[in-house]
Amino acid sequence: MKVMVIGRGGREHAIVRQFARSASIERVYAAPGNDGMRLESELVPIDEMDFAALAEFAKEHQIDCTFVGPEQPLTAGIVDFFEGQGLRVFGPSKAAAQIEGSKTFAKELMAKYDIPTAAYKTFSEIAPAIEFIRQMGAPIVIKADGLAAGKGVVVAKTEEDAIAAVHDMLEDQKFGESGSTVVIEEFLDGEEFSFMSFVYNGAIYPMEISQDHKRAFDGDRGPNTGGMGAYSPVPQISAETVEATFNTIVKPAVEAMAAEGAPFNGILYAGVILTAQGPKVIEFNARFGDPETQVVLPRMKSDFGDFMNALLEGEKYELEWQEQAVLGVVIAAEGYPDKPVKGKVLPNLASLSGVDIFHSGTKATSEGFAANGGRVLFISSEGDSVKEAQEKVYAQVNALSWSGFMYRTDIGWRALG
């Protein structure tokens, strides 16, 4: 088979690599991809949002399946466009992608179908939002309603911080149109984990769970980012909790979307928190998480191309996963997430051994790879335990000089504490 992966980040590099390692796959194209993907795919210089050009390329090159990585083309309707052209594509329709594109839509869906989540209210004006914050007290969570690249969430420890976040979004339009409406919800305390599933025509194939580290600095301090590292499995989350999450959250969400006339096909990502009352939804996404993909997909033993073909053909498939743990660290440009400094050249990556490297925001230069975005690389390692994987990856990362870059030194700490 020939496949095309749409996107340019670390998540898409992981998808590309998984396809490239599959015996069933003849060729992988990445559109537009990034320079770090060149060894495993043929780069196609077409923007993710140029649906017509992407569809034309898929026709000309007889692509058997297009896999859409990022949320922006999904929420803009790329799947509907491709299907309208008679092309085989994996991802949710524009209507189904609302589960990520609008937090209000997701919250109303959960309320209607009794899917456990935090209590909330939605606001588009400052005064009633502040009044609600005063009523609820802190800590409290402020979320931009629309897409904000994982950065549109403020966990406010004080009422003043919460009110400042409301002003940032509604008045100063920090996230543009995405923040013209805010969702304010109760703060939930507990262990977080990411539960991703392949979904197609009602069939649900859960993946191994993972845990992402959202905060910029060690000890889960600092601003929320798109994710600073991840690991899988998550030993502190029991098999019973995973099963309960599937039965009370994942399956009901898929059934709810079908009942609403917007059946969900693609990757359903449930960000979950284990509270004293059981697992509850923090957020839904309509695609793979980044960086969770980089630790979950490498644990797949099955041929990814064979599985995707079976899924799209409606054939049953036994997905197999390896026991070994995978843990990885994001290398970000200095100043991330607010003001990342681009252009700094990375140290010699060829000196690293026993690790996987996924490129997120890099550009090839005459001096080597340089930073071309906020999150630059994801470096991971396998181990018989989370601790072993952690020790192996940090032994390699810490051996290099990262002037002009930043990374957390404690990824996986919750599993080891």
Image: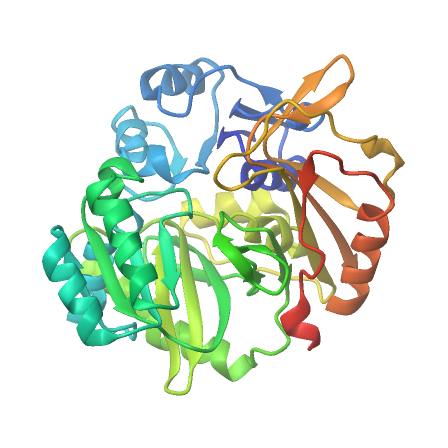
Q: Position of residue 190 (x, y in %)?
A: 47, 78
Q: Position of residue 157 (x, y in %)?
A: 39, 68
Image quarter (top left, top right, bottom left or bottom right) of the C terminus: bottom right
Residue 64 is left or right of residue 398, and the answer is: left
Q: Quadrant of residue 162?
A: bottom left
Q: Position of residue 358 (x, y in %)?
A: 67, 39
Establish if 397 lies above or below 78: below
User: Residue at horizontal 77%, vertical 21%?
Assistant: 368
Q: Quadrant of residue 244?
A: bottom left
Q: Report the front residue among 245 and 223.
A: 223
User: Residue at horizontal 56%, vertical 81%?
Assistant: 238
Q: Report the front residue among 201 and 230.
A: 230
Q: Position of residue 113 (x, y in %)?
A: 19, 71
Q: Quadrant of residue 79?
A: top left
Residue 225 is left or right of residue 324, and the answer is: left
Establish if 197 lies above or below 45: below
